[in-house]
Image (cartoon, grey):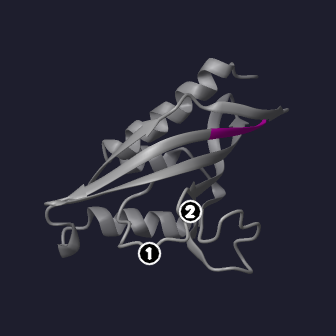
Amino acid sequence: MSVSNDQIIDFIYAEARMLDEQRFDEWLALWLEDGHYWMPLDYQQTDPHLVTSLMYEDIFMLRLRIQRLTGARTFSQKPKSRCSHVIQRPFIDDINGDSITTNTAMHYVETRMDEQFLLALTAVHELKVVDGSIRIANKRVDLLNSDAAFGSIQLLP
């Protein structure tokens, strides 16, 4: 079963909304078990294994991150951080059978108490259609100013 371009684009918007609304269990359910969330440290980095990354997390590490964010004893999240993804309409770069690659430019704002920061970024989603549903195989988030010094990014751009 194939999916339409509108379904793919709606999927990207829905994923961003889940993160903004902290519906983390729903967000984790979008992922394939062998997927990775990658945020390179260097501009145009090609390998997450040979060069340090800001994040390179498999599904196990993503689940741990979510447990930390939602845990009752996570004092660094009292009050909780909040975020907002402002995304451009995603481009569908490639469809090859059940594999889809998208590219989405966005601004990401994260706030906690009186602190707020903005990141400009591009997200590349590698998606798979599994049993008629779109799932995330991999997600790469390239920060426009990846070479800058950053504070702690608590949530997921």
Quarter holding the N terminus? top right
Residue at horizontal 21 percent and vertical 67 percent from the top: 77
> For the point 66% across and 31% down, which residue is it?
91
* Residue that carries the numbered disc 2 in the rendered image: 59
Residue 127 visible, this angle: yes
- Predominant secondary structure, magenta span: strand
User: Against 37, is 8 above or below?
Assistant: above
Check disc 1 and report its element: helix, strand or loop.
loop
Tell me the amino acid under the disc marked 1. Answer: Ala
Whether residue 1 is visible to the viewer of this picture, yes or no, is no
Q: 48 or 61, which is in the foreground?
A: 48
Side of 156 where 55 appears, left or right: right
Coordinates of residue 76 in the picture (x, y in percent)? 21, 73
Instruction: Check if residue 100 falls in the magenta segment.
Output: yes
The numbered dot on residue 87 is none
On screen, residue 131 above or below 143: above
Which image quarter: residue 39? bottom right
Q: Name, please, the residue furthest toward the right.
A: 96
Label 2 environment density (alpha carbons within 10 Å; few <14, some 14–19, many ≥20): some
Extent of the magenta region: 99-103
Specify the label residue 149 is tagged with. 1
Give whichever of discs 2 and 1 has the lower sequence position: 2
Relative depth, front residue between 134 and 144: 144
